[in-house]
Amino acid sequence: MTVSDSLPEGFTELEMFSFGTVMLAEALFGFSLNVLTIVSFWKITELQTPGNFLIFNLALSDCGICINALIAAFSTFLRYWPYGSDGCQIHGFQGFLTALTSINCAAAIAWDRYHQYCTRSKLQWNSVFSMGLCAWCFAGFWSAMPLLGWGTYDYEPLRTCCTLDYTKGDRNYIMFLIPLVLFNFVIPIFIMLMSYQSIDNKFRKTAQVKFNTGLPVKSLVICWGPYSLLSFYAAVENVAFVSPKILMIPALMAKTSPTMNAFIYALGNENYRGGMWQFLTGEKIEKAKIDDKTN
């Protein structure tokens, strides 16, 4: 897309500025929280447990989402995409890679928590390392497919950021969409539902509620559900008749996931929060509070 003084179709100057401001806020806030999560894990020895390694991986992927949103915000303030078609493909790939990894890591954390609270064995380093690696590789496979012709990356309605092109709704898109959503949204949601339901039952039996078991699933559905619904809607209806502003809402909601995840898995975890506080202030935390209960 070339430099132009004209606005993308369907948007006013104020709306472009508003969308850019929202994405900038999401990017900076989410990036700050997740960088703090990453550095705390790296610096505080007590936080370096197998379960927290998965939270560390989640924060890495969420930082990638924030970087993607930051680029989109910058382009939105410019009112055009300045990086060319190749840049669009890279932007789409990077955004998809980190988003899918984030979802998969959330499912991996749920599985780890299930083992921690509902079985007598906890996942060890080799297991969680393999899970983290698989999350990235699996997301990398699906993210690379549009670059190879199965699906397509193209501009979002703002024309200032790139993602999976859902506007065509052709057979190629539908054949890519169905397994994509099945393996990267439905199955992770199922794993999380089953894991947290078992944990909730355990908490009820022992009368010891250690965290809100419904919050991780609700957060994932709220952040990524609208995007999944839009993708399926595009498979059966022509989204060209839908307002571009409405089409941008699911993307904005998805970009809130890094912030939500930071609050749920790091700041919402008493032990991990204690490690972050130790990193920021130097105040030593008791090792008894930072054992493998951090998941």
Image: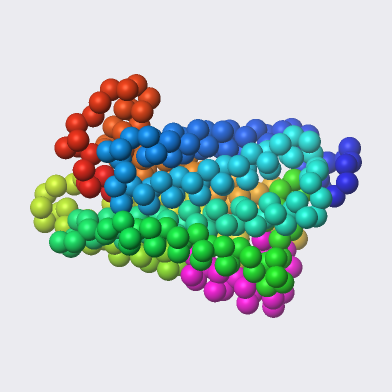
Q: Where is residue 47 in the image (x, y as percent from the top left)?
A: 30, 40
The image quadrant that residue 37 belongs to is top left
| Residue 61 relative to residue 95: left or right | left
Q: Residue at x 22, y 47 (%)?
A: 292
Seen from the viewer's position, the closer of residues 7 and 268 is 268
Q: Position of residue 200 (x, y in %)?
A: 22, 56
**Residue at horizontal 70 percent and vertical 65 percent from the top:** 147
Q: In this view, does 149 lie above or below 203?
A: below
Q: Give the range drawn in magenta.
A: 164-184
Q: Residue at x 74, y 68 (%)?
A: 168
Q: Position of residue 250 (x, y in %)?
A: 59, 51
Does residue 260 appear left or right of residue 81 in this picture?
left
Looking at the picture, does residue 246 appear above or below residue 34? Answer: below
Q: In which quarter of the image is residue 265?
A: top left
Q: Main secondary structure of the magenta part?
A: helix
Query: 145 or 196: which is nearer to us?
Result: 145
Left or right: 139 as drawn, with respect to 77: left
In the rendering, at what x and y percent does residue 20 appear? 68, 36
Membership of 123 in magenta stretch:
no
Q: Does the magenta stretch include residue 166?
A: yes
Q: How many labels does the image show?
A: 0
Res. 224 in view? yes
